[in-house]
């Protein structure tokens, strides 16, 4: 609290400059994929992307929903287990990059495909080189030619992919900012309940003291008590109850949450009923089974086709899918 002003018995104050909460998240750390001599740095902070997905429930829910549908329709292969595929799909949807490492037998034939965490994988400057970088001077170079990169196409560079939801980052953070502000709004007690504005000349100082004491006693275990005030021949507007910003803050909070939610749905291209969103209108969202079928045709099948690129690299149909069958578990 600062800048206190006193004039004619009226006290006014300001709360100082706004305090940024999320400026240090550091998502867009790089402009280009810088070459440090061994590998290329990602064009965005992968750690920042990871934190951002956890900042917004709609974003995280949509990404996990897509992952779950891919895993549900995936047909396990002797080289690629369901667990490894799940990690590949999760990384690809979150970061725009997914990796498979081919592990060979002593005779050189592949025995398994593992999915290293995309957050720590870097593409090498040399052809076919990939590194796992977990910290400063903590790096591991994969065997040359043993790593496949599932890359989301980008218009600015061809080294790393970028997640398709990147354009909705600001909406995701705005949703988080609104939630954090709302929490601080309640935790720090800034949500003053009301102003009791008393101008009735019939009320003397003793009456004012009695009203003040009654309001003080209404706090704590005795809160929400009714207060009776009798003022014979008093003016109509002599006593006014003025709420302090509560209604406006509530409306603004709801508007921000709804708008940013719609941005998330547009970026993820997942129908609202499949995200578990409660409809606000009486008609609802329509037939959820029809929505799932349409989503399968225009979203799930294209994702499956792009993931099948790994088959050309390994020389076998390691990634195959079955049609999405509602109400039936994957075998």
Image (spheres, rainbow, N blue to C red):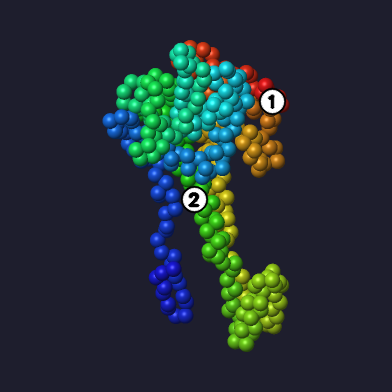
In the displayed structure, would residue 250 be above or below residue 278? below
Q: Residue at x 42, y 73 (%)?
A: 4
Q: Is residue 87 visible?
A: yes
Please indicate whether residue 330 sits to the left or right of residue 313 in the image: right
Specify the quadrant of the image occupied by residue 203.
bottom right
The one of 75 and 269 positioned closer to us in this rendering = 75
Question: Residue 261, how many percent across, how many down?
Answer: 55, 41
User: SS of the residue at dot 1?
Assistant: loop
Question: Residue 9, how many percent across, how many down?
Answer: 47, 80
Task: Please identify the residue farthest to the front as the structure is shown.
Answer: 106
Residue named by callout 2: 177
Q: Quadrant of the C terminus?
A: top right
Please indicate whether residue 287 sits to the left or right of residue 143 in the image: right
Q: Residue at x 63, y 40 (%)?
A: 277
Q: Residue at x 64, y 76 (%)?
A: 215
Residue named by callout 1: 329
Q: Quadrant of the N terminus?
A: bottom left
In the displayed structure, would residue 243 be above or below residue 308? below
Q: Residue at x 61, y 70 (%)?
A: 241
The one of 146 and 154 positioned closer to us in this rendering = 146
Question: Residue 323, how many percent across, how many down?
Answer: 63, 19
Specify the quadrant of the image occupied by residue 155.
top left
Q: Earlier in the sequence, mark 1 or mark 2?
A: 2
Question: Residue 33, how many percent across, how many down?
Answer: 33, 32
| Disc number for residue 278 | none
Q: Is residue 262 visible?
A: no
**Between marks 1 and 2 in the image, the one whose residue lies nearer the viewer:** 1
């Amino acid at each position: 609290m600062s800048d206190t002003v006193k004039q004619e018995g009226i006290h006014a104050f300001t709360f100082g400059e706004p305090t940024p909460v999320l400026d240090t998240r550091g998502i867009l750390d790089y402009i280009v994929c810088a070459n440090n001599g061994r590998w290329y740095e990602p064009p965005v902070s992968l750690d920042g992307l990871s934190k951002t997905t956890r900042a917004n429930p709609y974003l995280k829910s949509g990404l996990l929903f897509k992952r779950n549908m891919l895993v549900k329709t995936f047909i396990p292969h002797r080289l690629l287990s369901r667990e490894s595929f799940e990690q590949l799909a999760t990384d690809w949807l979150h970061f725009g990059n997914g990796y498979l490492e081919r592990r060979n037998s002593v005779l050189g034939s592949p025995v398994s495909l593992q999915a290293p965490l995309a957050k720590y994988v870097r593409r090498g400057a040399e052809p076919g080189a990939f590194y796992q970088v977990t910290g400063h001077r903590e790096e591991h170079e994969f065997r040359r030619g043993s790593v496949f990169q599932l890359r989301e196409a980008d218009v600015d560079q061809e080294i790393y992919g970028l997640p398709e939801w990147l354009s909705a980052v600001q909406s995701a953070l705005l949703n988080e900012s609104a939630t954090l502000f709302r929490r601080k709004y309640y935790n720090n007690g800034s949500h003053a309940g009301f102003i009791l504005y008393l101008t009735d000349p019939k009320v003397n100082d003793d009456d004012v003291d009695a009203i003040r004491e009654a309001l003080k006693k209404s706090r704590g275990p005795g809160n929400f008590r009714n207060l009776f005030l009798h003022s014979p021949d008093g003016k109509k507007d002599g006593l006014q109850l003025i709420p302090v910003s509560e209604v406006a803050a509530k409306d603004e909070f709801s508007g921000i949450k709804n708008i940013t939610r719609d941005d998330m749905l547009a970026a993820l291209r997942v129908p609202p009923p499949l995200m578990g969103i409660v409809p606000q209108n009486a008609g609802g969202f329509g037939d959820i089974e029809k929505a799932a079928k349409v989503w399968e045709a225009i979203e799930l099948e294209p994702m499956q086709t792009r993931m099948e690129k790994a088959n050309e690299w390994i020389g076998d149909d390691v990634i195959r899918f079955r049609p999405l069958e509602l109400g039936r578990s994957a075998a």
